[in-house]
Image (cartoon, rainbow, N blue to C red):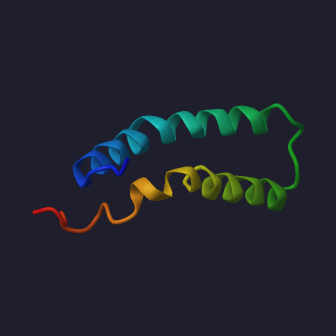
Amino acid sequence: MALTYKTRRRLSLLILLVGLPLYIVVALTVVGWFDRPSILLELLVYVALGIVWALPFKFIFKGVGQDDPDA
């Protein structure tokens, strides 16, 4: 089932306002469990986690910033 443009916009807002802060808290908690690695390794982990969170939602975010194609 394809999502309508309006539904994708609402889901993207929900993901950004609720899901992303939760993901940040979880990522900080998981990294905090380990001894502090070198700053470059820690930066690499945060950059990788910053990219990985959006991959499952790529289809929702695609085209959301453009005009409504149904209008």
Q: Residue at x 74, y 58 (%)?
A: 43
Which residue is situated farthest in the left direction here? 71
| Quarter of the figure that contains the C terminus | bottom left
Decide if residue 17 is on the left or right side of residue 20.
Answer: left
> Which residue is nearer to you in this view: 66 or 33?
66
> Which residue is nearer to you in this view: 48 or 33?
48
Which residue is situated farthest in the front direction here? 1
Quarter of the figure with residue 35: top right
Q: Which residue is drawn at 81% across and 62% down?
A: 40
**Place of residue 64 in the rendered image (x, y in percent of width and height, measured from the top left):** 31, 60
Decide if residue 6 is on the left or right side of residue 26.
Answer: left
**Place of residue 34 in the rendered image (x, y in percent of width and height, measured from the top left):** 87, 36
Decide if residue 2 is on the left or right side of residue 49.
Answer: left
Q: Is residue 45 above or below residue 70?
A: above
**Place of residue 69 in the rendered image (x, y in percent of width and height, measured from the top left):** 19, 66
Quarter of the figure with residue 41: bottom right
> Which residue is nearer to you in this view: 21 or 53?
53
